Image (cartoon, helix red, strand yellow):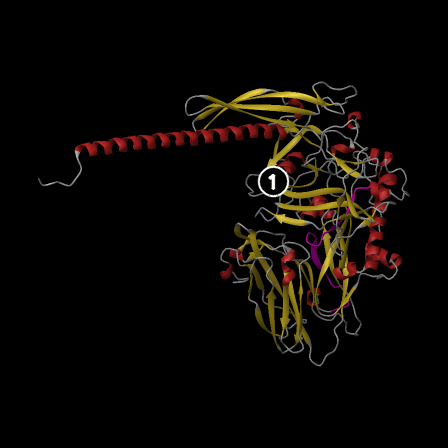
Amino acid sequence: MKQHKGFGLLEILITLVLLGVGVAGLVAMSRGALFSSQDGRRYEIAMRLAESRLDAFRNFNGIIAATSPETAYAAITAGTSSVSLSGDSYNLSWSVANQYWNGAAWQSTAPAGYRYTYPGRKVIDVTVSWSDSQSQTRSLLLSGAVSPTESLTGDQINGGLDTARPQPQVSYTPGVAPDVISIEIDSEGRKQETSKPLPTVTSKDGTVGKLVQFETVTYKPDASGTTRQVLQDLASVSCSCTYGSTLTSYLPGQVSLTSGNLLYWTVGNQTSKVTGIVDSSVKDQPALCDSCCKNHFDGSGTSFDQFYAPLRTPRQRYSSSLSVASSGHYVDACRFVRLDGYYRPLPDWNLVKVIVTTADFLAKPANQTSYQNYIKYVVKAYVTWQKNTLNWSYGGSVSSPTIEEFADWLPVHAAAGGDSTTTLTTGTGTAQLIARGIYVDLMSPDYLQQTITDLGDVDLLAKIPFQDINLTMLAEWSLVPLSGQLSGNVSDYVAVTNEPVKTIVDLNNYYFGSYSRGYLSAKKSTKDAGNVLQAVAIKATTYQGNSGITSTLISPLDQTGSKTAQLPIKIDVASLPTPTLTVTGRISCLEKSSNNNPDPVACNKNTFNDLSISTTTTGASCRIDKPQANNQPATYSCSAPEGSSLVLTLSYTAQGNGTYLLKPSTMSIPMTSPGTGLVITGPCSLLVDNGVTNASSLTCSP
């Protein structure tokens, strides 16, 4: 019989059964995996909800009372809530147990001698429940503790700081002159210095939206190194605001002194008063503007602590055109210090003196000593005036103290080996000038009476809130008109930069987030017709109050109360067969916002450290003036014989894994007389991180 190849009916039935069983198994597995995935997601959401609830309790902004919507620490109690997310319902409940430290362990009742009205910590158990894919109830428990301060020890129970345990030792590296000048403030050798301000502009308004941050540090050098004792994290901000309603808000913080002669600020009291809100029509203002607009109003009382500017009561508000604004929009500027993790408002800045020098002047140790002594003289003279003459009272007035300018004080008081004048004698070329301001706070009558008891005290400066601040990038720079000895205009002899304070990158307008102020160009000799060397002058002006620190004029009174200083400049040019010309040009720099963000920002000043310049032109020399602050460009300066063709080359050594482009890296500049003076404005160059978006197509000019 002939056999047939193929599958029989029985075989087919068996195969179908096996396939059916397999498919059913796969479906069951998939369904189980889906349920597991959904349940895992629900568990993760529940955990996040529990964590968020604990974090919300930790974000209290007051211990006894708080500003809505946050809860005061003392008011944290048990409760419940529910929330729906992704189609699922979650029920939250939390219990709160008050605990107190008895010197050895936590207990549920306050121990004898406990002086606070609130517990040392609150233990919170948060339970979240939900239904899983099988409609079964699931829950998780997350526990945490919330404390208003650090945990209390037996010594702290008696109400003060724990002085029994050793204090933490924090090392500190002092700043370097001329950017930072340290001042010895007491007989123990402690010193105080203020870091260089770092301006940041967030708003494109052009007038407001400036945030300026720096630190004032008190430290003590000793045999084992330098120990930081107090750090004041200071911020100043300019804003556009709108009048708001009457609310509870902060008065300015007040200065206080510890038993160890360490100066601190305490948070100001809260009171019901007029407030403001951020002007919504001005975009991208700094976050601190919320607090500035709200709190920067005086209180209704007449005591010292009610006023942000005690020498100017009552304070008026002004529009951006400096007309009185009694309603609607107004411009404002505020000063803050970080206390307990929050920026709290302080009294307005109070400027006493401004000085102007060259960077080289303050780099000389003997001149540093002279300036340090001048700061001490200014601070002591101003405090003596406060205590003996001002005798502050609401509505009172008194003439300002007589304090010598640095240029007048220096010839008599110069330190051994130091210069007795700030006058700059130079040839044609360029140099960076420095402006510094000495700020001394107004102190309350009570503080002056109780703390400043001896004006001859060797530790007097340790008890006075003062700062010496580098104002180079914040001062207004200008030329002083000629007084008759020289012909023409002062701009024929010198120039000084005074560019707008802007740190926003705008590639469409070839703006690279940096600006220049106080950069001097000495153009030609200041010898008169009788061959006598005369002087021209550069002037630095700083507005009074918060206007000066933020470089934002918010009041005409800050303008009339501004402080100025002048720097005389004599330009002596040697007689040469072939005149030498100087050419200068800007070097801007852009780098990535971060490793993961290719959007450009202005380079940090340290980025320029590996930038160098060379020339092959006979008789020529070149240098780079590197920036002294962030958001400041570098400048190249070359001298070469008139009539030559200067060829200069810029080069850069890449830092780390980054690669930078120079555009252009080589320039050929004809050294042709500019007609007036001996300084030529040369072409620019752009140093750009190759990781910046479209880096290869960017240029420094159209």
Q: Amino acid at mark 1?
A: Ala
Quick check: can you spot residue 523? yes
Q: Is residue 473 magenta?
A: yes
- Tell me where the magenta segment starts and ends, as one range: 464-486
Quick check: can you spot residue 118? no
**Residue 388 picture location, percent across and down:** 88, 40
**Residue 275 picture location, percent across and down:** 64, 32
Outermost residue on the front side: it is: 1
Quadrant of the image occupied by residue 235: top right
| Residue appearing at x 87%, y 58% in the figure | 415
Out of 677 and 177, give the one closest to the viewer: 177
Q: Is residue 231 left or right of residue 24?
A: right
- Indicate whether 571 appears above or below 220: below
**Residue 204 picture location, percent across and down:** 56, 48
| Residue appearing at x 65%, y 78% in the figure | 618
Q: Is residue 239 left or right of residue 397?
A: left
**Residue 544 picture location, percent across and down:** 73, 46
Q: Quadrant of the N terminus?
A: top left
Out of 554 and 123, give the one closest to the viewer: 123
Label 1's element? loop
Name the residue carrying label 1: 287
Quadrant of the image occupied by residue 156: top right
